[in-house]
Structure formats: structure tokens, C-alpha cells
Image: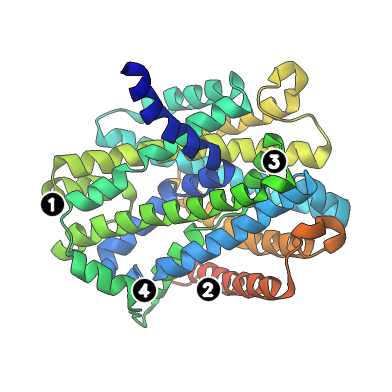
Amino acid sequence: MITLLRRRLLWPMGALFAVLGPAFITATVDQDPPGIATYSVAGAEFGYSVLWLLWFVVVLGAVMQEVAARLGVATSKGLVDLIREHFGVKVTALLMLGLLITNYANTAGQFAGLAEAAEIFGISRFFAVPVGAAAIWLLVVSGSYRGVERIFLLACLVYLAYPISGYLAEPDWGEVARQSVLPSITVDRAFMLVAVGIVGASLAPWMQFFLQSAIVERGVKPEEYGRVRLDVIAGAVFAMAIVFFIIVACAATLHREGRTISSAAEAAEALRPLAGRHASTLFGVGLINAGLFAATVLPLTTAYVVCEGLGWERGLGRGFRAAPHFYGLYTGMIVLGAAVILIPGAPLLGILLASQVMNGLLLPAVLILMLLLAGRSGLMGELAHGRRYGIFCWGLCGIVIVLDVVLLATAFMPGG
């Protein structure tokens, strides 16, 4: 009986984990504390009227992640390796420098989110941040790629706290359904900024580098590409489902009551009297998980990128002796990212703004280089995209560039 029960429970989970992998992890971890703050503010300020945007966001995320995954499968090389080979050392050096600065700001932002979330439960940041940093460091340093990936997939499940919070908020499901399919646009600066922020939060430069490096390290073969594509689609859909329920939870409570917030931690606290203690607790637990998850992956991405660019040994499970630069970079990013959050009076909002600006500057360049590579039949072989799909990808890239310009311009406008 016990054996049968184990089979019934573990076989579906094993089958699920066999399909899910790097793309699912990448899409989910992008729902980090700054992103959750963006979605929470959107729901609190504009209610369900922003839900229709998620259709575009899920397509954008799936397409761009598919391109990165296909590059990794077809070439068995990381994105930085390909950029160095095809566009030269200068372009690679500039990209590496930009990603190093951006990822550091983003890593600090994840620890800031962790600190805020811990304080919801009465835990001091001077305890939560060092313990969290030590835990994620040990996870990566002592684990193999497969082991770390399984833990990442389990961490993805914690994001299910947000659908439960959304349900406990008791939204008007009829209105949710209506506004999910009927575009509703308010022509004012605040709405446009939130709309662009939702789209911008769904795609970050580090995602493309991490996913391609993970695909290569996993050793995925071209004949396995169909499974990778399912992984990409599942990740995009799951990530947007999480965003959907974050917006719904805040719209059904904070927007209905006319409450305004400025962070995800404020959203979690504000949910308590409006949706109940359990909804607030789940929202806070999700935020802690998101901070730890992203604070693990962003330093990993940086280590992959720099080591690829400079030709150093890299990869999980190799150990400090085999890959000292890889683990040294990973350790340095975590220590410095956590340390800045513990400085009294640290400009947390300034750090988050700087990371947003750097993301906006770097993302168009990364997407353009990716699409140029993915269309080369000599490099990609049978996995090179066709003319129609290529035009579609370039169209999405053009929209992203326009939205980034709007977001960056708004960030520097008076009152922004």
C-alpha cells in the first residue's frame, strides 16, 4: 500500500520535474521583490484594469526565453561565449561590465526585499539578511547542478502562496474575468508608468544569460528541444499566473478600500485587516521566498557571465579548487549585496531605481544581439528561426525598446 501510494505521489512529481527545468526557474525567479512591489502597487492603484496587459507579457516572456533556450541547445555555448566569438571582445567587455553593475544593484535589491519581508514577522534585518545570505551561499557551494535545480523547483512551489492569497481576498471573479480580456486604458502618466513597469518587470537582462548557461550546463541536446520549449511555455504561464493573483489580491482589498502602498511589504501588512491574517502571512512568506530565490540566482548569473567572458572554469558542483573564480565571484556578490543593506540609512530606494535604470539600458542591447545570433543558419542549423517568426521576434523587441525608453524618460522626469 505504501509503495503504491509513493508511486502515485512521486511519479507525477518526477514526471513534472523531468519537463520543468531552467526556463521554468528563470521565469519564476523574475517575480522578485521589486517586481512584486510593482504588481502590488498596480493592483492597489488601478484595480483589475491592468490585468489585460498580462496577455502581452506572457507572450513576450515566452518568446524571448525561447530564443535564449534555443541558442543554448543549438550551440552548447553560453550567450557571452557567442557574443565574444561573433561580435568581438569590446562588445563583450562592455556587456559584462554593464551586467556586473546591474546584477549587483539587483542583488542588493533582493536583500532589501528580504529585509522588509522579515520585519513583517518581527525578525530584524540584522538577523534575517546574514542568515539568508549564508543559507543561499551554502546551497550553491555544496550542491551539484541537478541538486540545486531541484531545490529551485521546490522554491517555485512556494509562489503558490500568491494564488491562495488572491482567493482569500474574495475578489469579484466576474469582474476579474471581464477586465482580463477587455483592454482598459487610462491616459495619464501614472497609469502609463505602472503599465510600462509591469511589462518591464517581466523581462530582465540577466534572465537570458542565466537560462542559456543553465541549458548548456544541463547538457540539453537538439533532439530534446521540444521538452525545452514546453519548459519555456510552462514557465511563462506560471510566472504570469503569479502576477495575476498578486494584482487580484491587492485590487480586491487595497483598491476597493482606497488604500495606497509603495512596496510589497506594505501590501502584505495592509492585507491583514482586509483579507485576513492568513492572506497577509502567505503574501509575506512569498516575498521572503522571492528575495532568497532571486538573491541566489542573480549572483550565479554574474559568475557565469564573467567566467564565460574571460574563459575561466565555471559550473555548479566543481568546487572552489576546480573553479575558484566562479565561486569567488558568487561569494563576493552575495557578501557585498547583503552588506549594503545592513548599513544604517542605506539608500534602498536609490539602489532599486539604479537597478531599474541599468536594466532598461542593458536589455535592448542583449535582445538585439540574441536575435542577430538566433537568425544565423550557419550557427543555429535547423534551429535557426524562420523569416516570419524572426519578424515577430524583432517586432516584440521593438516594442520592448520603446517601453524602455518611456520607462527611463519617466524615471528622470520631475515628479517621477
Image x and y of residue 359, in percent: 58, 56
Is residue 415 visible in the rendered structure shown here?
Answer: no
Task: Tell me the mark number nearer the camera, choosing from 1 and 4.
Answer: 1
* Crowd around label 3: few <14 · some 14–19 · many ≥20 (10 Å): some
- Name the front one of labels 4 and 3: 3
Tag 2 residue: 406
Q: Tell me residue 401's x, y (percent).
A: 61, 71
User: Gap in Å between the C-alphas at discs 2 and 3?
Assistant: 38 Å
Under circle 1, the secondary element is helix
Residue 274 marker: 1
Front-lying residue, 263 or 14: 14
- Residue occupying the point 45% across, 24% down: 130
Callout 3: helix, strand or loop? loop
Q: Secondary structure at mark 2?
A: helix
Mark 4 or 2, nearer chain start: 4
| Residue type indicated by callout 2 | Val
**What residue is at 24 percent from the left and 47 percent from the top?**
165
Q: Say whether residue 288 is left or right of residue 403.
A: left
The type of residue carrying mark 4 is Phe
Residue 286 picture quarter: top left
Which mark is in front, 1 or 3? 3
User: How far from the left and from the top, in percent, is residue 32?
Assistant: 44, 46
Mark 3 — residue?
Answer: 220
The amino acid marked with disc number 1 is: Leu
Q: Which residue is mark 4?
A: 191
- Asked if residue 300 is positioned above or below residue 194 in the image, the reply reads above
Q: Earlier in the sequence, mark 4 or mark 3?
A: 4
Say which amino acid is labelled 3.
Answer: Val
Above or below for 241 versus 153: below
Quarter of the image where the C terminus is located? bottom left
